[in-house]
Image: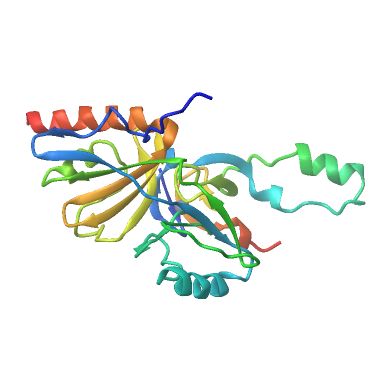
Amino acid sequence: MRITCPNCGPRDRREFYYQGDALALDRPAEDAGLEAWDDYLHNRENPAGDTADLWFHEAGCGAWLVVERNTVTHAVHKATLAEKAKR
Amino acid sequence: MVKLIALTPCAGLLPITHGGVEVTEVRPERLMSVAPYAGQSKATSAKLKEQIGEGLSAVMCRAGAVTWFGHGTWLVAGEVALDGVAAVTDQSDAWAVVAISGAGAEDVLARLVPVDLRAGVFKKNHVAKTMLGHMAVTITRTDTATFEIMVMRAMARTLVHDLDIAMRGVAAR
Ligand SMILES: [Zn+2]
């Protein structure tokens, strides 16, 4: 599996650390209520298909990336800098 | 008061030579990490140019004393003052720096590094933040058959050990 880092180009997956669903970027408002916060912290989809995750180019440039990939075909569609992701 | 003797990161480990490939220690006088504040890249670049003759280098490149050192970070070999535009940290003692040179240097690194470092794609002053064995490293091609490798100082012995084994392997072929 390779991920194309926007800084470094295509790199082997061993250079990256996997964090989890990119949903983590969509932080609820402070006063959003317990249910929204519980959902944000604990509930994740388990999709058969396209998904977006946070990966850290740990043994590389140190950038956080949003990686879009497909859990069925294993295709990696693209990677963007997390700091540039729409929120 | 005990007088302490300063040792370089690779003291007692280098130089080593196998099969025409040589590894020597590089001893930068001063290394400062430079991380421009948000929106201050241009201002940082201008100040660097005034102070050491080069601005921020392109991603994955070195220019003069300035080396791209990861996302939003550069490592400058020299003294700089960038108050107000960038976070600057003195890292002079933090890095072990070695040079590997010789016709077989590419073959040695090919055994250890998952990135294509051949001359056709990785040219002079290109920089790769990648791995060597299990270590995070910064590799710069400094000449036709010479690379500079930086690891955290505590990894110096492991770096030399890994290079030594790969050099013996290449030399034995
Ligand atoms: Zn990267």
The relative height of residue B146 versus residue B110 in the rendered view (above or below) is below
| A59 shown above or below B60 | above
Image coordinates for residue B79, horizontal then vertical, percent: 48, 59
Can residue B71 be spotted in the picture?
A: no
Q: Image point 51% across, 54% down: which residue?
A: B33
* A24 vs B35, nearest the viewer: B35
In the image, A4: left or right of B132?
right
Q: Is residue A77 visible?
A: yes
- x%, y% of residue A26? 74, 53
Q: Residue furthest front?
A: B1
- At horizontal 49% and vertical 54% (from top left) the residue drawn is B32
Rendered-image quadrant of the C terminus of chain B: top left
Identify the image's colour scheme: rainbow, by chain, secondary structure or one colour.
rainbow
Outermost residue toward the top in this view: B2
What residue sits 8% from the left and 28% below the top? B172
The image shows residue B103 at horizontal and vertical percentages of 10, 47
Residue A81, placed above or below residue B55: above
B59 w.r.t. B155: above or below: below
Residue B85: image quadrant is bottom right
* Total residue callouts: 0
Viewer-closest of A31 and B108: B108
Q: Which residue is more in the foreground, B106 or A50? A: B106
Task: Locate residue B10 relative to residue B103 in the image: left or right.
Answer: right
Q: Where is residue A34 shown, x and y percent of the image?
A: 91, 42
